[in-house]
Image (spheres, coloured by chain):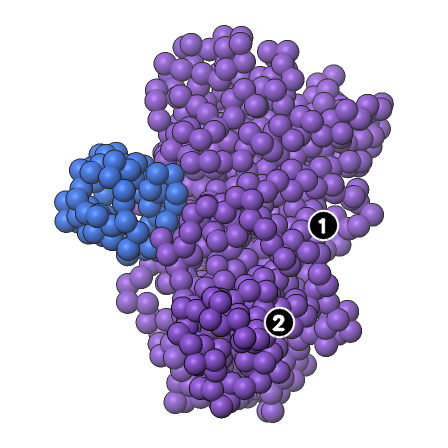
């Protein structure tokens, strides 16, 4: 599947805004991404958010990713 | 997902009722205990010595005279805070912000602290501490700080997010770009392009209760912290990390909170109080003065924003771009990034690009403030949207509706939206009676939209049923905006009992698993979800007790309106068992009845609001009076409508203060000139009209009751709504917030 990235996260993928990864869940997909682009691990350790079909998940690494879903990696967001 | 997804047209018994708040009596009688209201036997008074300079090398700190003062029990400086951060830069920034390490980075930066037997002795000791400074060049303006010859705040900062990676230091900590399409192509298709630059000044959340805590920490590493905070679990983890403590040995209890709005999501002086307690082996109470709150906690960014939007004559936007420069104080932040992510989120744009810069200055470390960064971005974008509508001779609401994001729109920050509420809020604005009210002389009307991400996060609750049938619900999310009332309603709904039968308590860090901080509009969303599941667990226990009592299988028992019923003709002779009856027999039927839940409450859903504002501007003085204000926002499901409306009104009120009056004013020497409520003027009741509200209820499919967070989005549109209203009233575009009387007069004079 394709995971898309933006912002400062693209720096960790050598500028690529889209990466082919594997995995059935958010956790597996992030592990796959880190294998391909180890520099992303620092961001994963700091925390990221993942949008699956527009729904933003911050912590549910067990969230299943439906087939054909749009997956977007975002920086982790703080609120007030 | 462990929960259902279809929540439309749900029927509720108690949800949606405007019940009395459970903390009301405590708060009006003075029984509620806030951060400064705790005391302990033998407690000392903590005080902090702060830098009078904007930027200075700390050459020497001589505490010898202060140490000899009778009654002084402990003094700490940066040397008393060993580095336990393990190379974590963010933790080190927090530690250095709590106590300077070799350099004072802003006016008010802590350089030493004292614990003494009383306040007089502590203050006297502060005067006896001799600090030798060497003043360094400083910078407090965001645009100045970005210039190549600007004084550098940290020589280790290299701008992240640029290629190739820089090799020299800069005050720009990171650059973040979001968007899609090709804005140059889009602008080439436009019939009209408008480009403007905007500035907003730094503001403080303005919570009435100053930071306060009571700390104990023994030589065995066991400690307790009573503190006013939005997140006591986060404070525990943070303090333990900074001070090298075991998390489980530090118990943190949250007091009642007198406002936070994001400013109490981070530690400021709590690690200092704990370290003073450890060094003196006595409890230490530390309460900030208002001046300290202004100078040394976390206000929001000052900003400088360029917005460019192009549109066709038919009213369709062809491209939009923005460059957003956010001042983050003396440490790196993510505020420019958030501004870039939120700036165009309300609109359906084929070509969009937003670039956010986080910029260091010699000011206090910026913290979250209610939908952090979004109001300033919205000020610029919504102002240009209004200008475009005027150029196109279109109604500004119709123009927004024509370009509003909808299901299937690719958000400017990346993903494709599911069902969202911006369209319905704009339609509600269009049809609101407020829009039909005629305006008088010197009056103007403005509308604006706003967007914010909500989130859920880690949550853990316990629900215990007493033998009299009363219910104690323990949650770990601090009640900053009425969540105890909402959560009691939710527990009552699930159990089928009266609201008054449920008592909600905020548990300390030893009594529950981790709960994320109450931020991101998550309190009622996340603890509400965990409460539903905990209550359902308790219902399962009660059904089993009833089944055992009757001697029938549990699958023949249903729970309806607070009673267990045996279903089926064969059980028709079994009378229902109420919650109270089951609870009364619980000691002999298996012991206490409880339900528990821990959940990562993701799926909070994004939030939109649209506001209408009428103002009257005195052209002689430049003074502005808000004469009517209306908030329209999607709440998913309003559990307690009073509190939802209160959040809408509170956000608007803070936004009105931000738009018209509030600003940090720095002198040429880099020191803050107005660190108090006399010179930093937040709006009071007499400054505000009644703020009307309209709650839209478009259920969030990721919450069992359809709840969305409501606490933050309402502060996003006001700067722009008021900016548009003032601009329409005076006939001059306002581009600088706050729109204080001198700025309005100058804008009128410049236009003439």
x and y percentages locating residue B19 in the rendered image? 71, 61
Q: Residue at x 42, y 51 (%)?
A: B4
Crowd class of label 1 (few under 14; some 14 to 19; many from 20; radius 10 Å): many
Please indicate whether residue B207 sits to the left or right of residue B538 in the image: right
Label drawn at residue B262: none
- Which residue position is annotated with label 2? B502
Please indicate whether residue B126 sits to the left or right of residue B278 in the image: right
Q: Residue at x 49, y 77 (%)?
A: B546
Chain letter corresponding to the colour blue: A
Please indicate whether residue B705 sits to the left or right of residue B19 in the image: left
- Which residue position is annotated with label 1? B682
The chain containing the residue under callout 1 comes to B
Look at the numbered discs 1 and 2 and tell me whether their residues touch, using CB distance below 8 Å. Answer: no
Q: Colour of chain B?
A: purple
Q: Quadrant of the C terminus of chain B?
A: top right
x and y percentages locating residue B107 in the rendered image? 55, 57
Q: Residue at x 59, y 37 (%)?
A: B609
Give the mark toward the camera: 1 or 2: 2
**Can residue B122 be seen here?**
no
Q: Tell me if residue B733 comes above or below residue B455 in the rendering.
A: above
Q: Residue at x 63, y 14 (%)?
A: B394
Crowd class of label 2 (few under 14; some 14 to 19; many from 20; radius 10 Å): many
Determine the CA span between mark 1 and mark 2. 36 Å
Q: Tell me if residue B35 comes above or below residue B403 in the rendering.
A: below
Q: In the depicted view, which residue is nearer to us: B629 or B145? A: B629
| Same chain letter for marks 1 and 2 | yes
x and y percentages locating residue A66 in the rendered image? 27, 42
x and y percentages locating residue A19 in the rendered image? 20, 37
**Can residue B499 be seen here?**
yes
The picture quadrant where one finds residue B388 is top right
């Amino acid at each position: 599947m394709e995971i898309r990235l933006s912002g400062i996260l693209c720096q960790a993928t050598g500028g690529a805004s889209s990466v082919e990864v594997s995995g059935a869940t958010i956790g597996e997909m992030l592990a796959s991404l880190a294998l391909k682009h180890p520099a992303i691990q620092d961001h994963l350790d700091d925390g990221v958010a993942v949008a699956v079909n527009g729904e933003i998940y911050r912590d549910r690494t067990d969230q299943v990713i439906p087939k054909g879903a749009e997956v977007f990696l975002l920086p982790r967001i703080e609120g007030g | 997902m462990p929960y259902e997804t279809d929540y439309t047209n749900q029927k509720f018994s108690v949800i949606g009722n405007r019940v009395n708040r459970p903390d009301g009596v405590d708060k009006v009688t003075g029984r509620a205990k806030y951060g400064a209201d705790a005391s302990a036997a033998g407690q000392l008074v903590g005080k902090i010595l702060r830098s009078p300079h904007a930027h200075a090398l700390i050459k020497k700190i001589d505490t010898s005279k202060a140490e000899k003062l009778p009654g002084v029990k402990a003094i700490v400086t940066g040397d008393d805070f060993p580095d336990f951060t393990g190379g974590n830069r963010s933790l080190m920034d927090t530690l250095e912000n709590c106590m300077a390490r070799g350099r004072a980075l802003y006016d008010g930066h802590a350089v030493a602290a004292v614990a003494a037997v009383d306040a007089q002795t502590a203050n006297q000791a502060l005067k006896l501490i001799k600090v030798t400074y060497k003043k360094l060049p400083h910078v407090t303006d965001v645009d100045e700080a970005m210039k190549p010859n600007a004084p550098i705040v940290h020589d280790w900062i290299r701008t992240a997010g640029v290629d190739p990676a820089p090799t020299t230091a800069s005050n720009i900590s990171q650059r973040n770009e979001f968007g899609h399409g090709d804005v140059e192509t889009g602008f080439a298709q436009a019939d009209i392009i408008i480009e403007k630059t905007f500035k907003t000044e730094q503001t403080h959340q303005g919570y009435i209760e100053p930071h306060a805590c009571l700390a104990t920490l023994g030589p065995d590493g066991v400690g307790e912290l009573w503190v006013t905070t939005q997140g006591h679990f986060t404070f525990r983890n943070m303090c333990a990390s900074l001070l090298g403590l075991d998390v489980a040995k530090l118990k943190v209890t949250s007091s009642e909170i007198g406002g936070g709005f994001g400013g109490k999501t981070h530690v400021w002086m709590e690690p200092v109080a704990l370290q003073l307690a450890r060094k003196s082996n006595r409890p230490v109470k530390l309460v900030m003065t208002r001046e300290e709150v202004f100078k040394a906690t976390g206000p929001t960014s000052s900003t400088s924003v360029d917005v460019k939007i192009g549109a066709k004559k038919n009213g369709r936007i062809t491209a939009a771009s923005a460059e957003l420069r956010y001042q983050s104080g003396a440490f790196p932040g993510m505020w420019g990034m958030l501004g870039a992510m939120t700036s165009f989120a309300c609109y359906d744009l084929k070509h969009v690009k937003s670039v956010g810069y986080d910029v260091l200055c010699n000011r206090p470390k910026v913290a979250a403030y209610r939908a952090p960064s979004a109001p300033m971005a919205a000020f610029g974008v919504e102002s240009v949207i209004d200008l475009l509508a005027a150029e196109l001779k279109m109604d500004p609401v119709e123009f927004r509706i024509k370009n509003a994001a909808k299901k299937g729109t690719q958000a400017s920050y990346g993903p494709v939206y599911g069902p969202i509420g911006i369209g319905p809020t704009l339609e509600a604005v269009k049809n609101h009676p407020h829009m039909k009210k005629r305006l008088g002389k010197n009056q103007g009307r403005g509308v604006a939209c706003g967007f914010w991400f909500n989130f859920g996060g880690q949550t853990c609750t316990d629900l215990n049923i007493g033998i009299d049938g009363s219910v104690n619900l323990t949650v770990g999310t601090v009640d900053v905006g009425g969540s105890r009332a909402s959560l009691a309603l939710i527990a009552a709904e699930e159990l089928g009992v009266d609201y008054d039968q449920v008592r909600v308590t905020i548990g300390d860090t030893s009594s529950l698993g981790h709960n994320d901080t109450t931020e991101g509009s998550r309190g009622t969303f996340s603890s509400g979800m965990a409460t539903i599941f905990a209550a359902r667990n308790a219902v399962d226990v009660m059904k089993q007790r009833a089944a055992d009592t009757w001697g029938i299988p549990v699958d023949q028992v249903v729970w309806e309106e607070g009673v267990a019923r045996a279903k089926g003709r064969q059980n028709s002779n079994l009378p229902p068992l109420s919650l109270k009856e089951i609870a009364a027999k619980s000691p002999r039927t298996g012991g206490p009845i409880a339900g528990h839940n821990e959940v990562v409450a993701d799926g909070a859903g994004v939030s939109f609001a649209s506001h209408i504002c009428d103002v009257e501007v005195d052209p002689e003085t430049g003074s502005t009076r808000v004469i009517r204000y209306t908030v329209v926002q999607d709440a998913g499901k309003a559990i307690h409508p009073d509190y939802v409306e209160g959040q809408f009104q509170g956000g608007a009120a803070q936004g009105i203060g931000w738009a018209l009056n509030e600003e940090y004013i720095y002198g040429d020497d880099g020191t803050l000139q107005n660190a108090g409520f006399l010179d930093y003027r937040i709006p009071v009741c007499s400054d505000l009209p009644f703020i009307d509200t309209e709650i839209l209820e478009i259920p969030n499919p990721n919450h069992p009751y359809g709840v969305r967070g409501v606490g933050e989005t309402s502060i996003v549109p006001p700067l722009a709504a008021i900016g548009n209203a003032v601009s329409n009233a005076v006939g001059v575009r306002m581009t600088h917030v706050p729109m204080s009387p001198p700025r309005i007069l100058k804008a009128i004079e410049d236009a003439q």
